[in-house]
Amino acid sequence: MKRGLLLVNLGTPDAPETPEVRRYLREFLSDPRVLDLPAVGRWLLLNLVILPFRPARSAAAYREVWTPQGSPLMVHSRALAAGLVGALGEGWQVELAMRYGTPSIEQGLQRLRDAQVSDVTVLPLYPLNAASSNATAVAKVFEVLQQWFDFPPVRVVPPFFDQPGYLDAMVAGARPVLEAARPDHVLFSYHGIPERHLARGGHSNGGCGPESPCVHTLSERDGHCYRGQSYWLTRELGRRLELAPDTVSVGFQSRLGRTPWLRPYTDEVLVELAQRGVRRLVVLCPSFVSDCLETLEEIEIRGRESFRAAGGEELVLVPALNAAPQWVEAVVQMIEAPVPGLAFPQR
């Protein structure tokens, strides 16, 4: 019998047009782990504030990065799945699913069930732990499985920010870009989350200010903290890439609404760096394993424009891992190894 692998990525509209984007945003922002408001408040915000206006703006942004093959996130996710089919061989059935949109998690699991796989390994394609990414993907998997009378053994690969294969693949992708660009400064930009998500998940030890303990060290006590993982990953990649600490900054992007999100905000950091005299900037986005709207439009297009308008000269984005051979091999190692808990090497 074959073993089953379900890759889960965030999702994408079916087309860069307002109706398709509205449908996608409705599903995405109806998730209480994403827009964590009481049900009535979430419905009012979504239907009276967001959906009447945001889909048209988002559709225009998607058109900036859409390819003849479709959404970049979908194109790269499919390429990763195809690479894994080749690397894993006939002993595995590989399916791709999206938390929002198509192909759905339910469709992906059903295809594995139809193939009568002996077991299922679920890999959420999120390096870091957050309720609005990894947790909601895993919750949806088990929500689907609970509707079935019976199902095969299921295991979930945990967030892999500290796994050697992921780190090696990130370094392999970033090093040639850094050598070619010769930047004055390097910005590590992570997808933001509301500060309250850390408190709700019990991950805000010491608060979320610049002196929060997780900014400087990551212990088993706060090892699931998204912010702490982001700063640990920045330090580790900076060390491996031999970056001087005073030439490295961290930012959090893609915030929504007026409530406080994790700071500093990437769009503000880009302007501050340019005003401070940084002329050549390289940006890495380690929380995205596939290039998508947030990397290609938000950073490479709008971020570059903001940086230049504030006095910078050049912004270079390091491509996401996408379907790079070293990343494919790293995924193979992660899914073939026993699934560990989070490891805490010397930091």
Image (cartoon, helix red, strand yellow):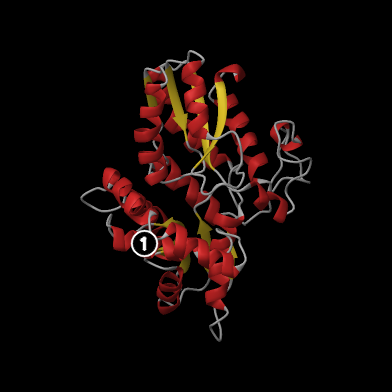
Q: Quadrant of residue 177?
A: top left
Q: Pick out the residue farthest to the top.
A: 277
Query: Residue at the location (60% across, 44% down)?
Result: 261
Residue 211 visible in the picture? yes
Q: Secondary structure at mark 1?
A: helix
**Seen in the image, is 244 located left or right of residue 300?**
right
Closer to us: 162 or 336:
162
Q: Nearer the viewer, residue 258 or 326?
A: 258
* Residue 15 shown left or right of residue 177 in the figure: left
* Circle 1 residue: 22
Q: Nearer the viewer, residue 227 or 234?
A: 227
Give, as a three-letter code, the residue at label 1.
Arg
Residue found at x 37% / y 34%: 302
Give the residue at x 41% y 35%.
299
Residue found at the far bottom of this picture: 149
284 up-or-down from 5: above or below: above
> Mark 1 Cα within 10 Å, few/some/many (few <14, many 20+)?
many
Task: Work out whether 284 lies above or below 336.
Answer: above
Q: Residue furthest left?
A: 68
x%, y% of residue 88? 42, 56
Determine which quarter of the picture holds residue 136. Answer: bottom right
Horizontal side of residue 276 vs 61, given as left or right: right
Give the image location of residue 150, x and y in percent. 56, 84
* Residue 103 vertical position relative to residue 322 in the rendered view, above or below: below
Q: Position of residue 41 (x, y in %)?
A: 58, 65
